[in-house]
Amino acid sequence: MIETGQIDFAKGNGLVPAIVQDADTGKVLMLGYMNKEALEKTLRDGKVTFFSRSKRRIWQKGEHSGNFLRLVDIRSDCDHDTLLVLARPRGPVCHTGADTCWAETNRHVNFLGYLERTIHSRKGADPHVSYTAQLFARGLNKIAQKVGEEAVELIIEAKDENEKLFLNEAADLMYHYLVLLAAKGYQLEDVVRVLEKRHK
C-alpha cells in the first residue's frame, strides 16, 4: 500500500483523481476524487472513500446503497498525482444500477487468471465444501494422477466428432492442470515465461 505522504495533493488543490479498477476482472469501474482525509480513511477502513466535489464532503462509496468497494490495493502514478485503486465491488458501482459508470458489464476478460486465483484461494479450504480443496487434501500424487486421467479422456474424445464432449474434456484437463501447477507452487505465467523463451 502507498503512504499518504507520497501523494501530491497540492497540484490539484487538495484533490487527486482516483481511478477504480476491479481487482479480479481488470475492468475500470469509476473515477472519483480523493483528498488526504479520504485516502487515509480508505486505507484505514478498507472501503474506498472519496471526496465529493458536489456535496463538498467525504463520502464512502456504498454508504447509502450498500454497494461498497472493498480495497485490495492503491497505487500511485509516476507523478504521484493520480491514484489507481484496485477494489472488489459489492454490487453495481454506478448510481444507475450499471456495473460500471460507463454502463459496461463487469465480467472476467481473463477468465483463466480468475480461475487460477480461485484455485489458489482454495488451498487449505474445507474439503467438504470445495472439490478443489478435496484435490489439494488428497495430495500431489492424486492430483497428478487426475491430470493423467483427464489427458487420456481428452485423447479418446479427440478421435471422435463430438464437439461438446471434446471441449468438456479439454476444460477438465485445463482445470486439473491448473490445480497441479498450484499444488507445485507455480502459476500459469511461469509456464508462459518458458514458452516465451522458446519462441524465436
Image (cartoon, rainbow, N blue to C red):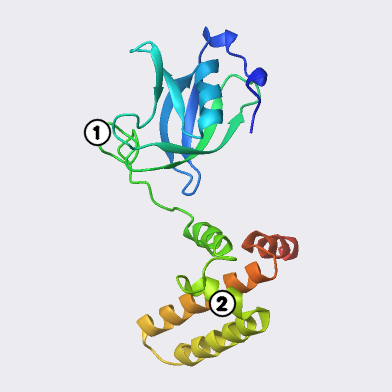
Position of residue 163 measured from the top left corner of the image (x, y, whole percent): 37, 82
Secondary structure at numbered mark 2: helix
| Amino acid type at image mark 1 | Thr
Which residue is pictured at 47% across the width and 71% down the height?
130
Which residue is pictured at 75% across the width and 61% down the height?
197
- Residue 174 visible from this viewpoint: no
Which residue is pictured at 31% across the width and 33% down the height?
94
Q: Is residue 105 above or below residue 138?
A: above
Q: Residue 135, labelled with which disc?
A: 2
- The one of 63 and 88 positioned closer to us in this rendering: 63
* Residue assigned mark 1: 96
Position of residue 193 measured from the top left corner of the image (x, y, whole percent): 70, 60
Left or right: 54 with respect to 11? Answer: left
- Residue 193 visible from this viewpoint: yes
Q: Quadrant of residue 84?
A: top right
Position of residue 117 measured from the top left corner of the image (x, y, whole percent): 55, 58
Q: Quadrant of residue 100?
A: top left
- The one of 121 and 159 positioned closer to us in this rendering: 121
Left or right: 198 with respect to 125? Answer: right
Secondary structure at numbered mark 1: loop
Local packing at callout 1 (Cα closer than 10 Å; few below 14, some 14-19, many 20+) is few
